[in-house]
Amino acid sequence: MAKMVNKEEKRKQIALDCKDLLLQKGIKKITVSELANAAGIGKGTIYEYFSNKEDIVFEILNILSEEYYEKMLLQMQNKTTLEKLNIFFEFFVTKKDDLIKIYKEFLAINLSEEQKFIEFHSFLKETYQSLLKEIVKDEKLATMLLAYATGYFLQKETTLKKEEFLGVEIYKMLKGKL
């Protein structure tokens, strides 16, 4: 009897098995055969789950983004507004090498696939905007804080010390003025 395979789980597992190799070599210097070897499957099997190697990068980015978001939500349970903001901003400020490298690969390949890039960023913006709005109870303030946090995330080449990050201070300062 044939073994039943959960296609979505198998897709995720293949992507995660390819992650280290992608981080080492980058999307441009890697072949589908190398990705298949890293995942312990045949080259043809890769194409059963992904249209191309770029789709693997996108899947890894989705998986990592979802994992970080879920961890953040768990940490926020039963916390005060300021504690939740600290957790939120810490996500954007704390260096996450794997996520940043995969994100850069995603940016490089999506210059040619503009629609996928726009959809992914819209999804992320809506997700984090909604979370911030729930925390601070103010849409304008949530928009400003997200822009601030996103700027830090995108300049990850330097490590920012927690005491240098002003997200919570900005919240305190602006809360009564909006």
Image (cartoon, rainbow, N blue to C red):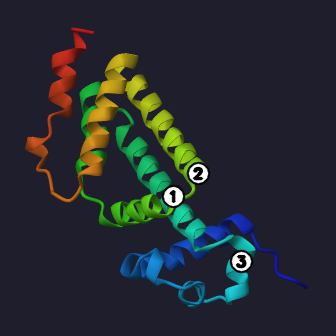
Q: How many marks?
A: 3
Q: Residue furthest right?
A: 1
Q: Residue at x 23, y 51 (%)?
A: 155
Vertical position of residue 97 compared to residue 25: above or below: above
Where residue 95 appears, as percent x and y from the top left, is 24, 58
Q: Crowding near pointer 1: few (<14 within 10 Å), some, many (20+)?
A: some
- CB contact under 8 Å: marks 2 and 1: yes
Q: Residue at x 64, y 72 (%)?
A: 52
Mark 2–mark 1 distance (CA, rounded to whole Å): 7 Å
Residue receiving disc 1 = 110
Where residue 8 appears, as percent x and y from the top left, is 69, 64
Residue receiving disc 3 = 47
- Circle nearer the N terminus (2, 1): 1
Vertical position of residue 32 compared to residue 135: above or below: below
Specify the amino acid type for callout 2. Answer: Lys
- Circle nearer the N terminus (1, 3): 3
Q: Residue at x 23, y 48 (%)?
A: 93
* In this view, the mark in front (3 or 2): 2
